[in-house]
Amino acid sequence: MKSAIQEGLVSTVIENTKRMLLSGDEAIALAARDAGIALGTGYPGTPSTEILEAFSRSGGRAQWCPNEKVALEVAIGAAFGGARVFATMKHVGLNVASDPFFTGAYTGVSGALVVVSADDPGMASSQNEQDDRRYAVAPGVPMLEPADSQEAYDFMLSAIEISERWKLLVLLRVTTLVCHSYSVVQPDEKQLPAPPASFEREIKSRVMIPAHARLAHRKLRQKLDQIQAWNETSPLNQVVAGSKLLGIITSGVSFMHTREAAPEASVLKLGLTYPLPRKQIADFVKSVVRCVVIEEGDPYLVDAIRASGIQVEAKPEMYRFGELDVARVRRILNYDLTPEPVKLPGKPPQLCDACQYRIVFNSLRERDCIVAGDIGCYTLGVLQPFEAIDTCVCMGASLGVGLGLRHVLPSDQARRVVSVTGDGTFVHSGISGLIEMVYNPPASGHVLIVLDNSTTAMAGHQEHPGTGRKLNHQPTNKLVLEDLIHAVGIRRVFIVEPRAESNEFDQILSECLATNELSVIIARRPCILIAKQLKQYEKAACQAAPPPVARAVTPRVAEIPTSL
């Protein structure tokens, strides 16, 4: 075997063949490259992060956006221009992108647009276990579910074809196991070249005033009816012949577990799971004595099939939680409702020994602060020995939640409320909360701490607008957080480097908690895990930068309390 460096993917090429050993994420990226995708957008989040990174390494044009909503809007714009594009995000990211996602179902596209949503059954690295298959039904978006890396590749190509044929957004829904497991992929060598981008005015299709939207909704439903009829004989669905005593309907990675758990069963594997091929499902159910639906997460397939008047057997409620595996599928098929074996707990995650966040959380704990937390590696401040985070809801929620607490708590408690967020999370969705902080300030003021470690550490050290580097780490315009915070009207902005040998952070925090004014503390120190890489990026940027142009500037220093 030899390394596939020429492919730009973390993979292995099998000698003397075109076959490659790829993760599901890499397979999606390879399909995007082979299909001539003009642009890939997204926001990093496990288990979807590696898709855009692999696409970029293979030569594709990829970019991280401030959040998933912006990523999808950029993709929609590119697809309005007739290009093939895709947007990637994890399951909760689709919540953020849901506004353009729903209306995009009405507008459709001129080129092709595939939205890749990566679910996280079992919550390996997520705050909830939502099942994004519901996101296909609500707006009316065709959905495909691959079972392994080969299907991740094939279904990505099929999603592009469906999108171009019906001029619709298409949802490619994957899960953690599909994203991160490796299997052999045989690339398709007969790809049609992507059409050139070109804009044609279609006002009634793209300007969703009510008069246009009513027509667009009817047009969407007509297209979905056409896709459903096509899906009855679609090659994306597969029937595996077996015993007539047991039939199983399944999709995605559950198919793999099913084949191993019940090799004797007849299986209907659904690939295009919205809209469903109702006649094919009904015929399959009639052909077997017992028919069980095996699916991870919500009873999405069961509910849809039963709603069509087809009686099938659902898994017990206890198997709704977490990932399925071969043993759990066997238990479902055997009606086993006994308690499942308890898995031994693994080593709990913790902040790095040299992490600057330790200083911050020690200080918050010592002052008995009520901390509205946020999504990021700093969320680990909730664990021992700190136990210094009281809430964590979603990306950017720290400000809104903290302000709500400040508004209603008695004065002695309100003054202890602090919002804590990271630099990447602040850019993602904290800016709106900052504006709320200025617009509706609590009587006791408020304190926001931005933990700025110059990276999106929670997802694997990706870039964001505040780092001044693009997805491929090349320099670009940088969002200066303190400039933005000053610009919205907050006067008290402090920049401090948390260090064990200094009490500067403690002093500033005490001063901010004692005042009724709005205060922001930017605790800035690069993540220790990428300090070496950051120096390399900065050196490369300096070498590539043009000579500076002399200009007069007025230095501005963040206000420091006189008591300090």
Image (cartoon, helix red, strand yellow):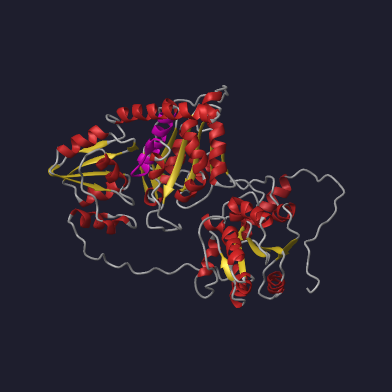
On the picture, is 556 further left or further right than 528? Answer: right
Residue at the bottom extreme of this rendering:
366
Residue located 24% across and 54% down the image: 329
Q: Does the magenta stretch include residue 153?
A: yes
On the picture, is 209 further left or further right than 139? Answer: right
The prevailing secondary structure element of the residues shown in magenta is helix
Residue located 66% across and 74% down the image: 500
Nearer to the camera, 247 or 366: 366
Residue 309, percent from left and from top:
22, 39
Q: Is residue 482 magenta?
A: no
Of the 4 image quadrants, the one containing the C terminus is bottom right
Q: Quadrant of residue 187?
A: top left
Residue 273, percent from left and from top:
33, 39
Q: In this view, does 43 lie above or below 19?
A: below
Residue 530, percent from left and from top:
60, 59
Can residue 315 be seen by looking at this rendering? Answer: yes
Can residue 33 be seen by looking at this rendering? Answer: no
On the picture, is 528 further left or further right than 342? Answer: right
Which residues are drawn in magenta? 141-163
Q: In which quarter of the image is residue 389?
A: bottom right
